[in-house]
Image (cartoon, rainbow, N blue to C red):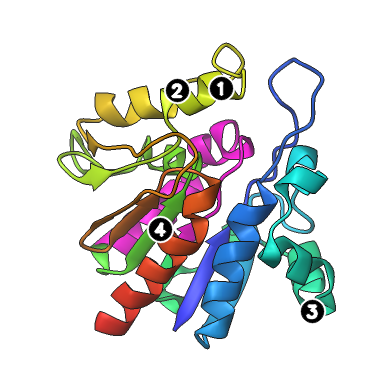
Amino acid sequence: MKILMVLTSHDQMGDTGHKTGFWLEEFTAPYYVFKDAGADITLASPKGGQPPIDPNSEAEDALTETTRRFQQDAHAKESLASTRKLGDVDMSDYDAIFYPGGHGPLWDLVNDKKSAELIKTAYEQDKVIGAVCHAPAVFRDVEVKPGQNLVGGRNVTGFSNSEEEIVGLTNVVPFLLEDMLKEKTASYSRGDDFTPHIVVDGKLITGQNPPSSEGTAKAVIQALQEG
């Protein structure tokens, strides 16, 4: 199992002056699910090198078993510090593509043509596509047929409008993920705020929020094992 994990390179929360990036748990929980299942993991980002970690996700109350494991894992830290440039990656080399969230992807990956190309190729090659929390934003410009978005008519989830309101960023983000998915004619569902909710639609697998990270990754592994 070869899995490509794609992380944001964007570190600014709009024009608020606050830092953002990827949410640490949404990377570490899937990373260790994949690693412990024996998968070969490649990390990539638009700019390559060390992707920005949202500082809020390193706060004491945001730490989890996997984020603490990561802090003690020199090899994982080294891998994260040296992500490949997205432009140098070929989807044919992988069995699955997975996007951790955080607010960063709403600014860079959503507009990244190479990212959209990788997702479209994964779809055409019948590979597993996974994204958690804000990361389903990356599907916005992925057309699998003229006028048909990847998520059109598909069952998906992602960070909900009410969760965005709870974190106080409704008026900061460039768009609301739940609204965008519905606009692309996805069949969007959600669980309670900040509780695990994972949606599997064939080989398209999405998770609603940080607590959904582990379950989303486990569903990716299951889809890979089922072929």
Highlighted range, magenta? 98-123
- The type of residue carrying mark 2 is Ser
Earlier sequence position, callout 4 versus callout 1: 4
Can you tell which mark lies on residue 162?
2
Please say if the residues under marks 2 and 1 sit with CB atoms less than 8 Å apart: yes
Q: Position of residue 138 (x, y in %)?
A: 45, 42
| Residue that label 1 marks | 166
Amino acid type, mark 3: His
Judging by the rendered image, the residue that carries numbered circle 4 is 130
The answer for how far apart the CA atoms under marks 4 and 3 are is 24 Å
Q: Does residue 174 appear in the picture of this structure? A: no
Q: Residue at x 43, y 62 (%)?
A: 215
Q: Three-letter amino acid code at disc 4?
A: Gly
Q: Nearer the viewer, residue 147 or 64?
A: 64
Q: Earlier in the sequence, mark 2 or mark 3?
A: 3
Q: Residue at x 84, y 76 (%)?
A: 74
Q: Is residue 56 left or right of residue 225?
A: right
